[in-house]
Image (cartoon, grey):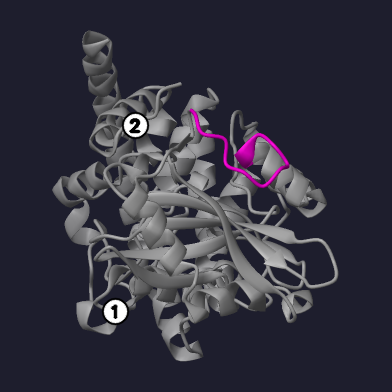
Amino acid sequence: MPMPSRSDRHIILEHNRTRKMARSAHAYVRGNTAKFYEWLDASPVAARVPQGPAIWICGDAHLGNLGPLAAGDGRVEIQIRDLDQAVIGNPAHDMIRLGLSLATAARGSDLPGVTTARMIEEMVEGYAAAIADPVSGDAGVEPEVVRSVKRTAVKRRWKHLAKERLEAVDPKLPLGKKFWALAADERDALEHVFAEPAVCDLILSLDPKNKRRRVRFVDAAYWMKGCSSLGLLRYAVIVALDHTRRRSNYALIDLKEAVEPIAPIVDRAAMPADHAERVTAAARAMSPHLGARMLPVRMQGRSLFIRELAPQDLKLEVDQFSHGEAIKAARYLAFVIGKAHGRQLDANARAEWLGVLEADRRGQIDAPSWLWESVVSLAGSHEAGYLEHCRRYALAA
């Protein structure tokens, strides 16, 4: 297929984003962070959302941004896998974002509203358990969607990553639908990035067996991936880890441009001014398995971060929930978010934040009224927004 020019990329990315968001209401929720905060701010309950401790938050804590991540020692843990929107902000926003995502997934599974109410209750229980004890708190029973993706993750090796991402095990990026040819200056700039000692040191540090190896740039392409990449630089790079006596191993590196976040910021002074440094710092605070593999870099005057992709890195795919699985998932995934928040707080700060959450657990369901009412309000706004999006998409088609 003909490769798009650099000037054509934006048009194709915009079309792809619009098409993906028209697939389902849940896809629309996942791909529309800006509307989430706009509608939350305009909702009747906005003034009652409490101001939690000023800590790193994901900023976009929907289901698709959670999944198994591999540590250097082979352990796999469910953590936040995308922190582009991470800021020093209000942790209540992550709770509402996750609650909306869970509620939308439940509606997509044709579950009744009473199930959504129970999910929000269990979500609060899981989050509170993690805040109370982020080290050994009770996450509850693992839902099948988590057990299944973890089972898959621990069995995966380079050949699986290559087959999935590259469509071949050979170390070359197949140009086509996902990978686009680079301009000459882009390729030169990428080769320069991967000659930097800090970048080579990071890649080699991720496996003790790499101590006597050297990093060699093999191939690169523009990566057409994800709704959030619209208009931003996104590259895939294959590097060889050469050894003088044995065959080379290979690593797949993701480079992504970091820009001004949409999520509301509570304390800008506490964050790095450079956006790639911000994303990397947030990952190290909230998702250490991922943060250990990330590094901010500069390229052609733009701020990007690199991360080595591990075969075990997957995202949660929720096609259908049963009533029981939905409730288990709500508790477990809220625990993941709570753990990411709680590990940043000392015992006194955790107790104070728990007190705020407990103070408003009254009314018709056992959850803070601001959380339930925010989810209900936003679910309505997003459903209307989704239908309007589909109408415009159909007319354009």
What residue span does the magenta drawing correspond to?
Answer: 165-176
Residue at 26%, 44% (x, y): give it.
231
Left or right: 287 with respect to 373?
A: right
Residue nearer the viewer, 209 or 217:
217
Quadrant where the C terminus sits is top left
Residue that appears at 29% across and 68% down: 275
Q: Which residue is mark 2?
A: 17
Q: Position of residue 63 (x, y in %)?
A: 51, 46
Mark 2 closeness class: few <14, some 14–19, many ≥20 residues within 10 Å: some
Residue linked to disc 1: 271
Q: Amino acid at mark 1?
A: Met
In terms of secondary structure, where does tag 1 sit? loop
Judge depth for marks 1 and 2 and give the one in front. Answer: 2
Is residue 39 visible in the rendered image? The answer is: yes
Q: Which mark is residue 300?
A: none
As measured in the structure, the alpha-carbon distance from the residue carrying label 1 to the one carrying label 2 is 29 Å
Amino acid on which disc 2 is placed: Arg
Helix, strand or loop: magenta stretch: loop
The question of residue 173 being in magenta is answered with yes
Callout 2 secondary element: helix
* Res 305 → quadrant: bottom left
The residue sitting at 23% across, 69% down in the picture is 265
Depicted 225 relative to depicted 91: above or below = above
Q: Choose between 219 and 67: the one closer to the eye.
A: 219
